[in-house]
Image (cartoon, rainbow, N blue to C red):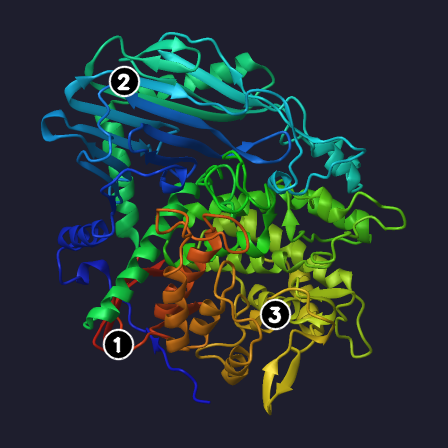
Amino acid sequence: MKTPAGRFILILWFALGALIPVNAQENNILTKTAAYNVVWNTPSVNSLGSMPLGNGDIGMNVWVEGNGDLYLYLSKTDAWSENGQLLKLGKIRISLDSNPFITGKPFRQELNLNDGEIVIHAGKPAEEVIITLRADANHPLAEIQVASKKPVKVKVELLPWRTERRAMTNKNELISAYGIEETNGNPIIQEPDHFLSPAGNRITWYHRNDRSVWTANMKLQALDEFADHANDPLFYRTFGACVESKELKPLTNLSLSSDGKIGACTISIYPLTSIAITESIWVNQLNYGIEKIKSIPADARIKAHHDWWADFWKRSYIFVSSADQKANENAATITRGYILQRYINACGGRGGSPIKFNGSIFTVDTYNRKAYNGFDADFRLWGGPFWFQNTRLPYWSMLESGDFEMMKPLFDMYMKALPLRQFATKKYYKHTGAFFPETMNFWGTWTNVNYGSKRDGMPDGLTENTYIRYYWTSGLELSLMMLDYYDFTKSKTFARDTLLPFVTEVLEFFDKHWMRDIEGKILFTPAQSLETFQTVVNPTPDVAGLRFITAKMLEFNGVEISPEHRKQWENLLASVPDIPLRTISGDKVIAPATLSAQEANIENPGLYAVFPFRLYGVGKPDIDLGINTFATRKNRSNIGWQHSSIQAAYLGLANEASSLVLDKFSNSDTECRFSAFWGPNYDWSPDQDHGTVAMTALQRMILQYEGDKITTFPAWPEDWNVEFRLFGTGNRIIEGSSTNGKRTEKILIR
C-alpha cells in the first residue's frame, strides 16, 4: 500500500509576520466561535434539558421549566463523600412571583461561549427579565444576576435530598457506589447534609465525612502499614456552599427572599471543599474566602472572567467548512461538537480532581430517564473510581489545543499516588518500581469489588476481577503523555519534579517484574492484553509502550539523567521483545499478543502500536502493518471510548477518519437537550470519552508531531476546508488553512 503523505514544516515564522492585524484576527475568531452559541427559544421540561456552565472546578446544570422556575444543580470536582462517591453540592431553585417563564411568553436562553455565561431573556418586552449566570473563571464563585424591567419578588431555595441517613439498597443505585462492597450484611450508608442557621443574608450547608471507607480499603489490600503513616483523603473532607444576596433576606435556613418586589439582585454562591477537623474551621475558611472575593471590585472581576474565556477561545481553534451545502452542514456539526466538547473540558478541567469520564460534573437526576430511572443527581454508572482507559481520553486532546493547565489535575492525582504504588509493588512483588491499577480510587488503590474481599487462597495483590488483573498499561501511557507534555511545554520544572520521578518508577517496574527468556528477552507472563485478552504472553500494548517510551527516555535531555539510569534503560530496551505479528488473508498485521486466549471485551489491542504508542503511522516505517491491522480490526464500534478514529488519523486514512469523526459528533444523548451531552454509551451521560476522542482525531487529521518534527494535513480530506490554530511541540503554535485543496501554514513561537 502507498504510504500517506503529510506536509512537513521546516520553516519557522514569527507572529510579527502575520498579514492581518492581530486584533482583527482575534475578533474574527470570537465572531466565528459565537456562531456556535447554544440558543433555546423555549423552556425545558426537566433536568435532562439542562445547559452546562463551569469554571474548571465548579459546575452548574442550568434549566428553566415552563410554568415553573429556574433550577440549577451545583457541583464541584472534589466533593468526595465518605463512600468515595463524587456528590453534587445541591440543587437550587430561583422563583420570580410574576412568572416570566410561562409557556407561550417570549423566551431565549443562550450559552454565550465567548463570555462563559448563560443569559436568559424571558417575558414580554415591557416586563422582560434578564438573568445572567456565570461560574467565575478565576474565583470559587457562582453568580446569578437578575434584572427585571418590572419589579418582581425573588426567592432562592435550596432543595436538598440528602436530608437523612439512609441505606442504599436498590441494586441499580448501588452501581453509583461502584467498588464499595457490602460486607457482613451491612448496607452502604449515605450520610445526610448539614444545614446551618441563617446568618445575615446567607444560607449555608455542607456535607461532612465523619467516617471513611479509606482505612478498610487499604487494609483489604494489605496496605495498612502504609496507611499508618498516611492521611485519610476522605475523613473530615467537608464540602458545601453559602448562598448570599444583599437584596434578599432569610425566610428559613434553606431559603432567601426579597421583602417586596425589586428590579434587580445578585445571588452569589460560594462553594468550598476542605479537610476541616471541625465545622467552625470550615465555616471560618468559607468566610475568609468570601471576604477575599468581595474585596475585588465586581466590574473588574467580571471583566477578568470575560477575558479568561476570550483568551481561551483565541488560544486555539478548528473551524471546518465546505463549499457544498450538505457537506457544510456536516462540517458545522463537526465544528460545533469540537467547540462544545472543548468548552465542557474547560468547565470541569481545572479542579481538585481529574475529569470524571462518566459524566464529569454535569450528571443530573434520573427521575425522567428511561433506564436507571428514579435516582437523585448523585447517581452515575460506575461511581467514583477512575478507569485509566477512560480517564486518559480527554487529556490527549489538550496537548494540541494548548490547554496545558487542565492536564495538571491528572498528573497530580497520579503523582500523589506514586508513593503508595511503590509501596504496593514492594509489598506484592518484592521488587522496586511502581505499577498502577487500571481501575483506581483517586488515592491510588483498586476498588474493593475489583480487588475482591474473599481472599482465601489468594496472594496479596492478585485481584478477583480478571478484567484488570494484569492490566498495568496505564503507567506506560501516562508516561508517554508526560513526555509529550514536556515536548510541548519544555518545562524543566515539570521534567524534574513530575516526569522523571514518575517514568523512572514505571520503567523500573517493567524492568524488574518479569523473567527473561533464553534469548534475554522479557517474557510477559502472566499478563493480559487490555481487558479483551486476559491470558496472554507478550501483550502488544505493553510491548509497544515499553519500546516507545524507553527509546524516548534514552533521547530525553530535559533534565540531567544519571549514567546508571541510561545504562539500565539501554539494557531494558534491548530486552523488549518484538511487536507480535500474525497473518490475516495473506497480509501481515499486528497481533494482540504473541499468544492470546479467548476474547472477553471489545478492544483492538494490536492498534495500540498506532495509538497511543506511535510506532506505526504517517512518516514512519512499516505503516502498511498499521493500515492492514486497522482494515482487519474486529471491533468497529464508534461510541464512547472506542478510538478507531484517532488511529485512522495517525495512519493517514483521511476518508475513514473523517467519517468516524462526523459519526461521533452526530450522536449525542437522545434524552438530553444539550447537543454535546454524549452518551450514555458504555459509561454514563454526559460521556466525556465520546466527544474527546473525536476532538483528538480531528486534531491529528490536521497536525501530528514526533519530537521536533511536525506534520500538517496528514489525514485531511480534499473536500473539507478548515481554518485552525493548534499547538505543536517545542513551544510552537501552528496556524493554517485548507481551502479547496490549497493548504497554507505558518509557525509562531510562543
Name the residue that disc number 1 marks.
719
Amino acid type, label 3: Pro
Mark 2 / mark 3, whichever is N-terminal:
2
Q: Is residue 432 left or right of residue 699?
A: right
Q: Nearer the viewer, mark 2 or mark 3?
A: 2
Compute the Cα span from label 2 to label 1.
Answer: 54 Å
Image quadrant in which you'd find residue 319: bottom left
Mark yes or no: residue 226 visible. no
Under circle 1, the secondary element is loop
For the residues bearing labels 3 and 1, Cβ distance under 8 angstroms:
no
Spot occupied by residue 550 in the image (x, y as percentages of width and height): 61, 66
Amino acid type, label 1: Asp
Count residues near mark 3 (Cα–Cα under 10 Å), then give few for <14, some for 14-19, many for 20+.
many
In the picture shown, does residue 394 fall above or below 586? above
Compute the Cα span from label 3 to label 1.
Answer: 32 Å
Mark 3 / mark 1, whichever is N-terminal:
3
In the picture, the disc for residue 605 is 3
Count residues near mark 1 (Cα–Cα under 10 Å), then give few for <14, some for 14-19, many for 20+.
some
Under circle 2, the secondary element is strand
Q: Residue at x 40, y 82 (%)?
A: 4
Name the residue that disc number 2 marks.
154
Task: Residue at the far left: name it.
Answer: 126
Task: Residue at the far bottom: name it.
Answer: 586
Mark 2 / mark 1, whichever is N-terminal:
2
Looking at the rendered structure, the number of numbered marks drawn on it comes to 3
For the residues bearing labels 2 and 1, Cβ distance under 8 angstroms:
no
Front in this rendered view, residue 370 or 64? 370
In the picture shown, does residue 546 fall above or below 419? below
Spot occupied by residue 613 in the image (x, y as percentages of width and height): 55, 68
Q: Residue at x 61, y 44 (%)?
A: 385
